[in-house]
Amino acid sequence: MRAANMKMSSTNSKRIDIVIKYGVSPIAWTNDDLPSLGGDTPLESCLEDIREVGFDGVELGGKFPRQANVLASILRQYDLELVGGWYSSKLLTRTVKEEISALRDHLALLKDLGCRVFIIAETSNAIHGDQEVALQRQPQISDDEWRVFCERMSAVGDYIAGEGLRLAYHHHLGTVVEKRQDIDRFLELTNENVGLTLDAGHAAGGGVEVAEIIRAYPSRIAHVHCKDIRREIFRGVLEGGESFLDGVMAGMFTVPGDGNLDFTSIFAALKEIDYSGWIIVEAEQDPVKAPPKEYALKGLETLKKLAARAGLGA
């Protein structure tokens, strides 16, 4: 446990651990959506870098084994925890029963490895993985589809909560939950068991002020991804009709401290709500142009300085 604070609950007088841990996504080393970016990088090389930088944990990547005992043994070698890992839902086209059946193996792995959150995003109509579709063509759904989608996501959230994890929905560029009005609608139509993976980079791309979301929905903030954005490159992607993946290759994302976002207000808001959980450094970049270990270290150092300044985790 790298940082902790004990807070007394006013409702039941029990001691509650307020803990901040720092993790990283392996996507900077090996990009699952664009195998040409780091596709030849061994898992062991990635994990060795992550350990040397000083992270507490790592999220799942495509090169990670899915057998719990095998993965647990590997992570122990590098003194790392498994934080969680992206799951692609299809609730606009699947029933709740079908989705729960589809996610069981992923959930079992997370449970066996002691994860606290189940990161999920709706991808049945997403465009972020299609290099032929312009990022500005965000998928849209009708009012009836919104209602059904959110009812189904709430039911999945209830199921995940019953299994001991918190559902953490990942708003994402190129998906149905991208902009502020989408996030508001989604959180208003889902129940409390549906938390949010708050991603600073995707929020910025969607015109969302992260600190405002934190303050508006304090009980729903379940997980935090910290990536920075290079606004000029991002604008060029939109204006040029380029895809999300084109933007990744062009360098629209980077680690905190290397882009245009001011994370000070984000950490101040997290402190206000006594956020407890993981803070993840994440940046989809070309590892040849942006050496992952070097950039991950810059991101981690930036976040730790900001956290100390805000008193977060202290």
Image (spheres, rainbow, N blue to C red):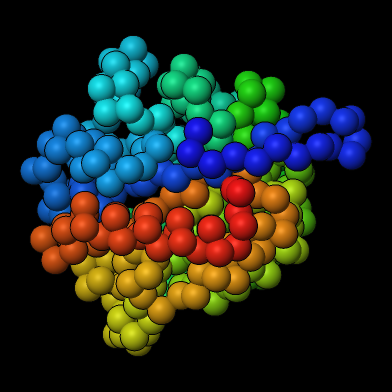
Q: Nearer the viewer, residue 9 or 216?
A: 9
Quadrant in the rendering for residue 252: bottom left
* Residue 141 visible in the shown view: no
Q: Quadrant of residue 207?
A: bottom right
The answer to which of 52 and 91 lies nearer the viewer is 52
From the viewer's perspective, tell me whether residue 8 is left or right of residue 58.
Answer: right
Q: Position of residue 261 (x, y in %)?
A: 46, 75
Q: Is residue 175 above or below residue 211?
A: above
Left or right of residue 307: residue 32: left
Residue 281 can be seen, yes or no:
yes
Q: Residue at x 21, y 52 (%)?
A: 293
| On screen, residue 296 above or below 290 | above
At which x and y percent is residue 133? Answer: 32, 68
Residue under the image location 50 percent in, 28 percent down: 115
Q: Is residue 101 above or below residue 178?
A: above
> Residue at coordinates 45% horizontally, 56% vertically from top-left?
304
Image-quadrant location for residue 105: top left
Residue 154: percent from the left, percent from the top? 70, 40
Q: Residue at x 37, y 55 (%)?
A: 300
Of 104 and 281, nearer the camera is 281
Residue 95 x %, y %? 60, 34
As drawn, the residue found furthest toward the right would be 11
